[in-house]
Amino acid sequence: MTQYAEVIGDPIAHSKSPVIHCFWLKALGLDGDYRRTQVVADALPAFLARRRADPDWRGCNVTIPHKQAVLPLLDAVDPVAAKIGAVNTIVARDGRLIGYNSDAAGFLAPLRPWLDERHMLRTARIFGAGGAARAIAHGLWGEGFTLILAARRTRAAAEIAAGFDPGFVHVTDLAHFAAPLDFDWKEMDGRLDVVVNATSCGMTGQPPLDLDFSHMPPGAIVYDAVYAPLETPLLKQAKALGHPIVDGLQMLTGQARIAFRLLFDADPPADAESEVALRDLLLA
């Protein structure tokens, strides 16, 4: 039987992970498959029990709403994922299920040109309090950012904030960013600002993020983890106002590279021609 992996979540039909992983499997000539499977919350334990017994199952990627719910169902959790408190990749090995998190590293990958520069001050505004927001917060904290966590569920945001130095992390309600801000940003030299949408707002079928751009420092990088559609209302407005933007497809492929190595024990192709072909395929 062909060995396979998959992505699980609810909803899941929008996921482009099968396109990415199947492209790499074919490019490398590997005998494998990658699928998408809808798993509702109540069915998660039974689903993992069935897959654990399947010798052809390599593991899965995990998306909304299971990134934290899977933790007690695993045999072991990688230290990075344990610190983040969320898992986005489960690897099956010798009957054991091991959890990893590739979201943080995948998120940071397209920011490297900016992160490699020196700054007097780094500030990140992160919208959301789910598993992706957790990983993003830990990734940016490791790069020296002061964090502003904004969410409708401020209690969940406060739980994320509890893992950091309280002097450099702040929690607020997402609604705070909807009203205009009367503030003079003054001189912006020597600082790096990143604004991240880690909510489902702006995703196909979901309302856009309610954000007034007066809260955004001039030159702030606007990064949307949503990739369907690729240009969300947030990114469209940010681009029109002259902000550098990063789309969710870049985070998706960044974390997928790490997950592919874990699931299939192989490095995906990274040459320029393959990169262009994959992006064209994802945008088709």
Image (tube, grey):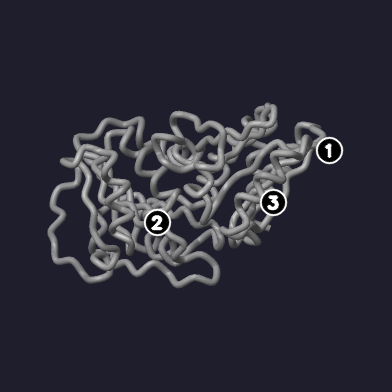
Closer to the eye: label 3 or 1: 1
Q: Which residue matches tag 1?
A: 2
Q: Quadrant of the N terminus?
A: top right
Closer to the eye: label 1 or 2: 1
Q: Which residue matches tag 3?
A: 281
Q: Which residue matches tag 2?
A: 197
Amino acid at the residue labelled 3: Leu
Q: Earlier in the sequence, mark 1 or mark 2?
A: 1
* In this rendering, position of residue 50 left or right of residue 241: right
Amino acid at the residue labelled 2: Asn
Amino acid at the residue labelled 1: Thr
The image's mark for residue 160 is none
Mark 1 closeness class: few <14, some 14–19, many ≥20 residues within 10 Å: few
Q: Are marks 3 and 1 in contact (CB under 8 Å)?
A: no
Q: Label 2 to label 3, Cα distance in Å?
A: 24 Å
* Residue in view at x 64 percent, y 43 percent: 60
Q: Quadrant of residue 11?
A: bottom right
Q: Label 3 to label 1, Cα distance in Å?
A: 24 Å
Q: Earlier in the sequence, mark 3 or mark 1?
A: 1
The foreground one among 3 and 213 is 3
* Residue in view at x 32 percent, y 60 percent: 151
- x, y percent for residue 167: 16, 41
